[in-house]
């Protein structure tokens, strides 16, 4: 597996991964068409590549995309479910089903946090739904703490000034 920066041409992959993130239970709650047309879902990916967008894509041995982690700055009037502040980017994470359980998600999350740290952000936020314990555990082990509640999800925040980068990871 290789990690590389997420490019504007990755917008379709990121769209697929928003679907995966919302449908994490396995239930088909949303489709790709929903992500393209629903204002709230679309704001995570529309026009990917604008200033402040930072992401990492995992690619398999045959060049196939495995998943991605990315952050985007959102505004209070078009906030995400994990919105905390306009200067705190919100993180999204997903691995396509065939590539799960092999460490891609962890590598993506760590590499994306490194990239956000390098960009100079003070913190990263996200939303994790009740019951998504695999994802929640990943975030908590990296120092994310609950700072809010939105529907059936917690809003988590990682303070990048106090958290550290684990050693020995693959660089993007
Ligand atoms: C959550 C998700 C990104 C994890 O990616 P993955 O590649 O399958 O996971 P990994 O193999 O990298 O393992 C992730 C972590 O779970 C742990 N883990 C893996 N299998 C586990 C299991 N059966 N039980 C407990 N922990 C487990 C790993 O040790 C790892 O922990 P670490 O990062 O602290 O070291 C992926 O399952 C996914 O895309 N799910 C659907 C979308 C989603 O839920 N996105 C997050 C929305 S908030």
Image: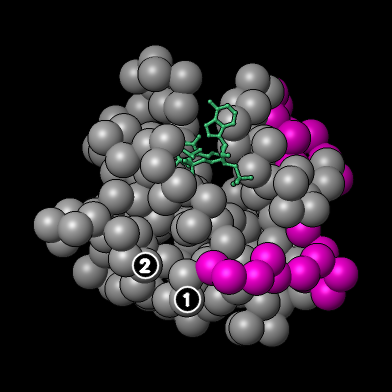
Asked if the residues shown at circle 1 and circle 2 are in contact, with their CB atoms under 8 angstroms apart, the answer is: yes
- Compute the Cα span from label 1 to label 2: 7 Å
Instruction: Give residue 118's position: percent from left, percent from top.
Output: 62, 83
Query: Image check: 145 left or right of 116?
Result: right
Instruction: Give residue 79's position: percent from left, percent from top.
Output: 63, 53
SS label for mark 2: strand
Q: Residues within 10 Å of mark 2 (few under 14, many from 20)?
A: many
Instruction: Give residue 148's position: percent from left, percent from top.
Output: 83, 41
Labels in figure, total: 2
- In which quadrant is the N terminus drawn? bottom left
- Please report the residue visible at 35 percent of the width from the left and 51 percent of the height from the top: 67
SS label for mark 1: loop
- Please report the residue visible at 12 percent of the width from the left and 57 percent of the height from the top: 62
User: What residue is shown with label 1?
Assistant: 171
Q: Disc number at residue 3?
A: 2
Q: Which residue occupies the foreground of this view, 38 or 16?
A: 16
């Amino acid at each position: 597996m290789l990690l590389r920066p997420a490019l504007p041409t990755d917008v379709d992959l990121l769209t697929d991964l928003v679907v995966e993130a919302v449908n994490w239970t396995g239930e088909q709650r949303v489709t790709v068409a929903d992500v393209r047309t629903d204002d709230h879902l679309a704001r995570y990916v529309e026009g990917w590549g604008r200033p402040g967008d930072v992401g990492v894509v995992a690619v398999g041995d045959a060049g196939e995309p495995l998943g991605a982690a990315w952050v985007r700055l959102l505004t209070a009037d078009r906030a995400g479910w994990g919105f905390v502040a306009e200067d705190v980017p919100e993180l999204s994470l997903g691995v396509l089903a065939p590539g799960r359980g092999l460490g891609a998600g962890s590598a993506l999350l760590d590499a994306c946090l490194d990239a956000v740290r390098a960009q100079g952000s003070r913190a990263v936020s996200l939303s994790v739904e009740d019951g998504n314990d695999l994802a929640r555990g990943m975030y908590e082990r990296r120092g994310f703490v609950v700072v809010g509640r939105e529907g059936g999800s917690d809003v988590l925040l990682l303070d990048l000034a106090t958290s550290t980068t684990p050693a020995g990871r693959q660089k993007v």
